Image: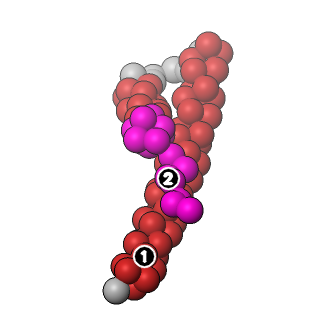
């Protein structure tokens, strides 16, 4: 049985994009922040949530991809040994 990757390349790209987009949007908001009104505070809360989700997704994707690489390498090594 061949192990397949848990994350598609599209999901991996989306996870990294979400994290970097959140950091970028938060930076823009901080740059433009003089006096915060209530609607701006809501914007910051939403962007902070986006950054948190992006960070969690990015960490999960990186860990899963590393584990999948190890599993696939081990399977290929076993298959090579059995063929010899």
Residue 63 seen in the current view = no
**Secondary element at image label 1:** helix
Tell me the residue at 55%/45% (across/down). 57
Q: Quadrant of the N terminus?
A: bottom right
Q: Is residue 58 left or right of residue 80?
A: right
Which callout, 2 or 1, points at the residue further toward the start of the chain? 2
Which is more toward the observer, 67 or 25? 67
Tell me the residue at 39%/85% (across/down). 81
Tell me the residue at 51%/60% (across/down). 2
Which is more toward the observer, 56 or 84? 84
Q: Position of residue 41 (x, y in %)?
A: 61, 23
Tell me the residue at 62%/34% (across/down). 49
Magenta residue check for 10: yes
Q: Position of residue 67 (x, y in %)?
A: 51, 66
Residue lying furthest front:
83
The reply to whether the C-beta atoms of the residues labelled 2 and 1 are less than 8 Å apart is no
Q: Quadrant of residue 80?
A: bottom left
Query: Callout 1: few (<14), some (14-19), or many (20+) C-alpha neighbours within 10 Å?
Result: few
Q: Position of residue 33 (x, y in %)?
A: 45, 24
Q: Point out the frontmost of discs 2 and 1.
A: 1
Residue 28 seen in the current view = yes
Q: Which mark is residue 5?
A: 2
Which residues are the magenta region?
1-16
- The residue indicated by pointer 1 is 79
In the displayed structure, would residue 53 be above or below residue 30?
Answer: below
In the displayed structure, would residue 59 be above or below residue 24?
Answer: below
**Secondary element at image label 2:** loop
Which is more toward the observer, 76 or 84? 84
């Amino acid at each position: 049985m061949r192990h397949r990757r848990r994350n598609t390349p599209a999901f991996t790209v989306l996870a990294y994009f979400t994290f970097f987009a959140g950091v970028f949007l938060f930076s823009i908001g901080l740059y433009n922040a003089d006096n915060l009104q209530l609607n701006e505070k809501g914007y910051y809360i939403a962007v902070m949530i986006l950054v948190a989700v992006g960070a969690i997704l990015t960490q999960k994707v990186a860990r899963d991809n590393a584990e999948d690489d190890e599993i696939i390498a081990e399977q290929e090594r076993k298959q090579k040994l059995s063929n010899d």
